[in-house]
Image (spheres, grey):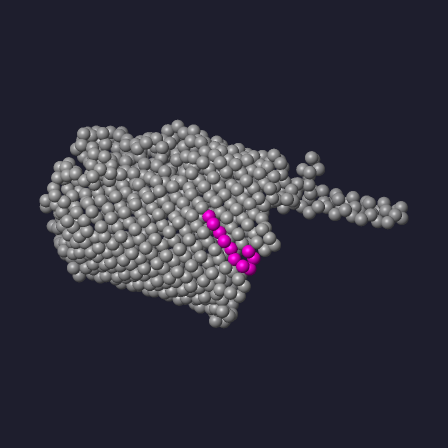
Amino acid sequence: MKLKWLWSNEWVLRCLTPLAGLCGAVSALSAGETNAPPAKAVPLPAPLTPEQMFEGGTNAYSNWIEFGAGGAVVRGNTAQFQQRRQMPGGAYGGIEDFHYQGNLDKKTTLAVDGRALFDNDDYKLNLAIEREKTGYLRFGYREFRTWSNGDGGFYPPGAENYPLSGDALALDRGELFIEGGLTLEKKPKVTFKYAHNFREGDKGSTSWGYAHPGGGATLQGLSPTIEHINERSDTFQLDVSHEIKATEFGVGIRYQTGKLDDGLRIDQYPGEAAQDKITDGQGTSYDLFNGHFSSETWLKKNLMFSSGLSYSHGEDHYSGSRIYGPDFNAGYAPNSQYGFGYLGLGGGARMNDYVVDLNLLTIPMTNLTVIPSIRIQEENWDADSSGYGTLGDAAPAPFGGQGNRDMLDVRERLDLRYNGITNWVLYARADLTEGDGNQKEIGGLTAINQIGVPPVSQNTDDTRFFQKYSAGARWYPTRRVTIDGGGYYKRDDYEYHNLTDSTANSSVSPDRYPAYLASQDVETYDANLRLTLRPWRNVTLVSRYEYQWSTIRTKPDPTSDLPEVESSTMNSHILGQDASWSPWSRLYLQAGLNYVLSTTHTPESDYTPLTPAFLAAQNDYWMVNFSSSLVLNDKTDLNLGYFYYKADNYYNNSAFGVPYGADAQEHSVRASIVYRIKKNVRLTLRYAFSHYEDVTFGGHRDYDAHVVSTGLQYRF
């Protein structure tokens, strides 16, 4: 056993190798003195690779199955724990991982991968058969669950909370696919794939319903809303590629059809005498076709031309309703307490999209690469809808609308890269997009009993010009130092020419939209720096800093008598530090720190300095993480980790307006032990603890959680 341990540790072999050479010399000397023939040197076994050391021998075992089980004990808000950790609040178990690969014959291989965790609703099965120089066939199924907290809001003045339930809402996602390909030598390569995707379940929505907290007269959006999702899609794709001399061609078609049956379940005025249930149904069926072509040609050894063409056509049909009732999914019944809704919504939309891509890669001189490219995209669509609007106990009023949109964008880009200076790499990019379009809207929801917004008529020409210039450099001043620096300037300009507008844009108009803006531009400056240090062979330090400053300027229609304003300013500082250290072959340490300071300022906060109804938006937070791995002996590994998150951007201004911002912190520790019972049998024990606090929701989303899990892996 001791001898096996010596051979399985590379550092021991390195220490013994000089002694072995000395022993060999002594043996040769003894043979010479006795006139005996020299003994043949016994070669030492080659040092084991890290993979072999981890597996316990030269046989790494290419197949395995791992069983796992675990569970969580949560004190506090279980739904918040499930959302942050994306795992069930109770026990789970099954097959964590399965892999098998083998040869069916000399040229054909089979690979199987699987996973099945019950009560975690996590399943996977992949089968692949591949024959050398002939083709392949693959089949797969994947299903997994995500969790979201469906709780409503928190009202600070009355310390009132609007929870949904103890467990989080669950949404299942999945894909079933089959794929095949022919890869014959010197023949066109053909691939075909069919995929069926789905999403089904519930998730929380922030489109909260109204409530009267404290029994007051003020409406507040606090009541929980559930988004019900039931979506299906089927995709068929066929691609063919072939190489003729110096040119590689590709052509393909793709067809997708789908059906979406979604909706919102909104609980209005919970706990009150006049409680309402709103069922907002949203149904869509669609068909999407795409055809594409590509080519890539080396005209010379330093000159390559590539191109791409794409055409897409899509059609959809939609339906929906928004019905108030004493319960969800109730039929429409007039009632004076009900708000705006609609019935019998129906309509459709059609879209055509054309794209042309042209690229040229040239190396005009040694160490210089130049890539000019151009992309042209034209898109046009039209849509129509009709239905009946409802309000209270009034008779439903018919409405209808039509719209169309045309767009043409031309994008030019130039990429440069130069590495002709020793220890330097320089790069730059210029990216420009020019576009114009037209949008028309006629109709829309109608007023009922002179309440609501009347239909609109709008015709707007728009132009846009996007520009972005970026540059950077990488410098290796010494073998152990790397410096990366760069930045960019970006500006997006939008101009609107309102040819027709049924709404008045004057200062006394109660409704100025949709044709209200005359222009808007977004400007951004960004600079970043990254320093990588390797002061010692087993130590790496990475420091990062990025600064970003953005402004938005908005100019309304001249008839509004309002000037152009700086409607938003955002400043962001992003700092990061990572360190990794391997003091010896059995120990690895890594730590990281990320700190973000971000503020978005708008003119509204200047208008209410004494009563802060509007505040500058803050998005400051910092995160700390630490992980380590220690090989205790040839059978046991120990892993430890820690994570901390803190955001402090909440200001309770609920007496004057709606409080926004996050104030939350989280501590999380984890530990695991891996014990190799045999060289092909491994047992893993894991433990994690999380503590979460959320001031924004008055502590109602706080929790403490203990998570314990285990895994048993058998390799064969």
Measured from the top left, where is residue 140 in percent x and y?
A: 46, 48
Measured from the top left, where is residue 289 in percent x and y?
A: 35, 58
Residue 656 appears anywhere in the view? no
Image side of residue 110 versus residue 459, left or right: right
Residue 48 appears anywhere in the view? yes
- Please report the residue visible at 19 percent of the width from the left and 51 percent of the height from the top: 386
The front one of 550 and 138 is: 138
Give the total number of marks visible in the rendering: 0
Measured from the top left, where is residue 324 in percent x and y?
A: 20, 38
Query: Which quadrant would the C terminus be assigned to in this image?
Result: top right
Measured from the top left, where is residue 593 in percent x and y?
A: 45, 42
Query: Which quadrant would the N terminus be assigned to in this image?
Result: top right
Q: Which residues are magenta?
A: 131-140
**In this picture, is 88 found above or below 298?**
above
Name the outermost residue toward the left: 449
Q: Main secondary structure of the magenta part?
A: strand
- Please report the residue visible at 39 percent of the width from the left and 37 percent of the height from the top: 84
- Please report the residue visible at 80 percent of the width from the left and 49 percent of the height from the top: 40
Image side of residue 54 versus residue 382, left or right: right
**In this picture, is 62 found above or below 358?**
above
Name the outermost residue toward the front: 105
Q: Is residue 341 magenta?
A: no
The front one of 483 and 552 is: 552
Name the outermost residue toward the bottom: 300
Q: Is residue 135 magenta?
A: yes
The front one of 565 and 672 is: 672
- Please report the residue visible at 27 percent of the width from the left and 58 percent of the height from the top: 350
Name the outermost residue toward the top: 75
The front one of 564 and 288 is: 288
